[in-house]
Image: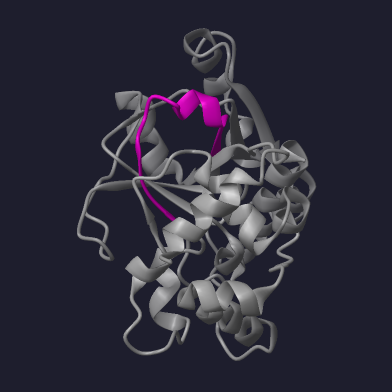
Amino acid sequence: MKFKEIIDEQAVIAEEIELLPLCHTTTEGFFLNIYDSKTIKAEKQCPVYNEFLVYFFYGKPSYLVEKELENYTDDPPITLIYNVNDLKNHKIKRIVPFDSGGFSRYKIKRGYDLGNFTHDSPEIISLKGIIKLLYQNNECYLKDQVDIKEPEILAKKCWPIKEMEKLYKRVKLGEIKSGKQVYSIELQYAGEIEFSPKYLILPYTFFTSSFWSEEDFKKQFPDIIIDYYGQKEIAEANGNLEAFRYQQLMRDKVFDIIK
């Protein structure tokens, strides 16, 4: 069986799983373009697929805004949280069980490619199938706890699952340089997504701007809930935290909201 067929098979027995929100993470300059156009759209082609794609992660703000996370930065992450139903009119291009950009680092056996671990043109219910296959429930997914039931039987039905199991073991042993993205389900959309998130999560230094007041942003988007992260930490660092710390604080805030 193909990976997508296994996912759809698992989705049938995963009715009890309630779908988590989707997260799109960006930075100030890109957010300004989103605000001006009232849409999220790709600024350039994705280097992995050579397509114009908009990326979300299921239930996690896993996109890294800095390649070198030990760098200090004045460009911290902003996350837009969408309810799944708010995107029901948009067709998903692909779902991948990890970040597609990290595939080349994951030491998958020669001959396999991203297509072997991808669900093309899926329905939103396919997310339940991936959760059921790899984590069993959302709680384990949010904790990055892989829990594949009967992996030997599944691997005989679908060889890529055997490689997935090996990948998680290598990550656990520290044999692969990987961040949280390896435990994050990636969704790709082609085209434009309207700017209609349920939540907008900002670093505290941005949140204090009068732009977000009732007269400006809130007047245009009264239904978007604005929240922030890092008030104490950013103040103590005089607004100059390391990139990984911004990422961590933002991630913690988003998890608090989603949980």
Q: What is the magenta range?
A: 79-95
Q: Position of residue 78 (x, y in %)?
A: 54, 43
Residue 210, magenta (yes or no): no
Residue 85, magenta (yes or no): yes
Q: Position of residue 94 (x, y in %)?
A: 37, 51
Q: Position of residue 181 (x, y in %)?
A: 55, 64
Quadrant of the drawing holding the C terminus: top right
Residue at (47% x, 11% y) in the render:
220
Residue at (44% x, 42% y) in the render:
28
Q: Is residue 90 above or below residue 133?
A: above
Quadrant of the drawing holding the N terminus: bottom left
Of residue 231 and residue 170, the one placed in the foreground of this image is 170
Q: Is residue 36 left or right of residue 220?
A: left
Of residue 138 and residue 41, the one placed in the foreground of this image is 138
Dividing the picture into quadrants, the one containing residue 243 is bottom right
Residue at (60% x, 78% y) in the render:
165
Of residue 73 and residue 135, the one placed in the foreground of this image is 135
Of residue 182 and residue 19, the one placed in the foreground of this image is 19
Dividing the picture into quadrants, the one containing residue 4 is bottom left
Residue 90 can be seen in this image: yes
Q: Is residue 156 above or below residue 146?
A: below
Q: Position of residue 227 (x, y in %)?
A: 67, 31
